[in-house]
Image (cartoon, rainbow, N blue to C red):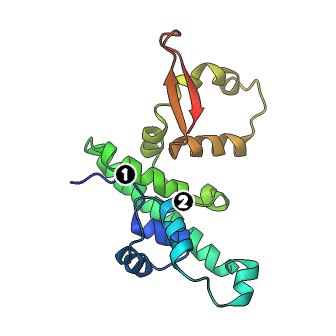
Amino acid sequence: MKSRSGPTRKSIAAALGLAPSSITKYAGLGMPVHSLEAAREWRAKHTKPTSHAMQNKRGPSAPAHQADALTALRHAEELSITALHALQRGQSELIAPGLRAALDLVPASHRAMLRMPLEVWEMLTAAVHPVIDADCTSLRDGGAQVDFAALGAFWYRCATGEFLVTTSVQGGSGGQLDAD
């Protein structure tokens, strides 16, 4: 089975507000599909903006944007189930990059609706856990006010791979978080 490191065509379509068939058409014309950024750049250079004047002034309509967000959310949830099965077979490294890319495409306004198995969250955030343990003692003991929205956003960003754990050569076993 071939490992996929970039977003799927379906996730690119959702992020660009296009049908998957449009991505296939544009890819045939030379649009790169290895990254969302490259696809956006190609599309901006090689396609004409929509002819609907009001849409150009106001951006995408709310229902279209809402549908794109829900499509991205559903895609991430579907991949999380695939990731659970891969994790159970010891093959999580095959699906993790694609799942991280799909999670990154879910708009912040819809991330709280995401339903993903706990085992998959733990797999995606495992590298961060050792760095966090000492700072969380007061939270577990009830000694601090918890901003759950900020905490949830942090863990979501960890799951997308936005934070990397680096170890200090001089510091031995300690680690620190670096934003990607």
Residue 48 shows up from this direction:
yes
Residue 59: x percent and y percent? 70, 77
Q: What is the C-alpha distance between the residues marked 1 and 2? A: 15 Å
- Left/right placement of residue 5 relative to residue 154 reads left
Residue of label 2 = 105
Quick check: marks 1 and 2 in contact, CB under 8 Å? no
Residue 138: image quadrant is top right
Q: Secondary structure at mark 1?
A: loop
Type of amino acid at the residue the image marks with label 2: Leu
Type of amino acid at the residue the image marks with label 1: Ser
State the residue in front, 129 or 173: 173
State the residue in front, 94 or 80: 94
Q: Residue at x 47, y 31 (%)?
A: 127
- Give the class, few, some or many, for how many residues have Cα within 10 Å of label 2's Cα (few <14, many ≥20): many
Residue of label 1 = 5
In the displayed structure, would residue 57 be above or below residue 52?
A: above
Residue 33: x percent and y percent? 40, 64
In the displayed structure, would residue 112 be above or below residue 131?
A: below
- Left/right placement of residue 121 relative to residue 135 reads left
Residue 14: x percent and y percent? 51, 71
Residue 81: numbered disc: none
Q: Secondary structure at mark 2?
A: helix
In the displayed structure, would residue 12 be above or below residue 101?
A: below
Q: Residue furthest front?
A: 45
Q: Residue furthest left?
A: 1
Tell which circle, 1 or 2, labels the residue nearer the N-terminal end.
1
- Left/right placement of residue 28 relative to residue 113 reads left
Q: Closer to the camera: disc 1 or disc 2?
A: 1
